[in-house]
Amino acid sequence: MPLDQIDVDQMHREEEKEMTFLEHLEELRWHLVRAISSIFVFGIVVFMAKDFVFDKILFAPRYPDFLTYRAICGLSNLIGLGDSMCFYPPDLKLMAIQLGEAFMTHLKVSVILAFVVAFPYILWEIWRFVRPGLYENEQKATRGIVLICSGLFLLGVLFGYYIISPFAITFLAGYPIAGLDEATASLSSYVNYMIMFTVPSGLVFELPVIVFFLARAGLITAGFMRAYRRHAIVLILVVAAIVTPPDVMTQFLIGIPLFILYEISILIAKREEKRYEKEFGPA
């Protein structure tokens, strides 16, 4: 490395060290202010688009013409199974039971959806605060981390929305009980389930990134993940069996992507494990 570049890096480090604790807090405060402001701005947009958000997004999995139902039925006919894989949601009626429930649910949806949309910007603000404290090799290793995390999160949310929610709604709303004539749910209950199907799914899809940092720190190995692969498969199959109709094909539609995610995490752990051993020796 050129001497002048070394001097620049040393000066940068000295300047970072000279920042007091209060100055770091002040810098963090402004990053948080900008991140929260982005949620506020997107929240206003979502709030104003109430009819579109509820009818075209949140309530869409209730309708038989939802993309997932049509796609799976089309796949069933394409592979020669006729309509055996076709399924549709029951007639689920929604009601606002409590006073102010519709308004409070509208506010909750605005905040949650704004968080999902603003997630890449929030990560970018966090990264801008963390990045100056990293060494050059650490910055290179985490290059593009905001884009990767954002992509995985949004992919997970879409997976929860298009795959998990249709199966889960069909199962939960159509669960048979003697004497139950029709399925009725409160608006807040339905929205809470939709949030539960999507946002946590986005966080679960961050598994490769979490494994990357844990393996880089020497806290997890590929061998450990391989040893618990069977446990992971059983857990994935149990989850898939709970939220899908009782046929193997639809269970695989949910289980396979989650299993692929786990296998990708093992490959990442193996790569970072080799790098850790090269830098610090065997763990």
Image (cartoon, helix red, strand yellow):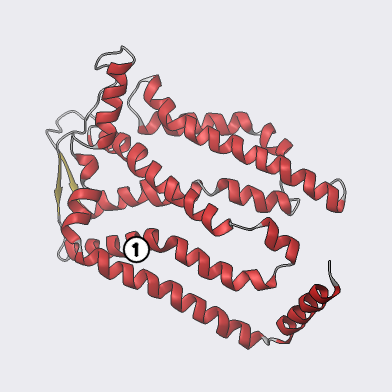
Residue at the extreme left of the image, as rendered: 181
- Image vertical order of residue 29 relative to residue 1, above or below: below
Q: Is residue 42 left or right of residue 176?
A: right
Q: Name, please, the residue furthest toward the top.
A: 80
Give percent across and percent down for residue 208.
Answer: 59, 46
Front position in the image: 204 or 138: 138
Give residue 225's quadrant in the image.
Answer: top right
* Residue drawn at the location 52% of the way across and 56% of the way down: 147
What residue is rendered at 79% in x and 50% in y?
Answer: 276
Q: Position of residue 61 (x, y in %)?
A: 24, 41
Compared to residue 258, the image places residue 101 above or below, namely below
Q: What residue is drawn where x is 79% and y is 73%?
A: 5
Residue that mark 1 sits on:
114
Q: In the rendered view, does 218 fall on the left or right side of 164?
A: right
Please indicate whether residue 151 sits to the left or right of residue 243 in the image: right
What secondary structure is marked by label 1? helix
Determine the residue positioned at 20% across, 66% down: 48
**Type of amino acid at the residue the image marks with label 1:** Ala
Q: Nearer the viewer, residue 247 or 32?
A: 32
Q: Residues within 10 Å of mark 1 (few under 14, many from 20)?
A: many
Can the viewer see residue 164?
yes
Q: Residue 221: tell me if it is visible.
A: no
Depth check: 260 or 179 in front? 260
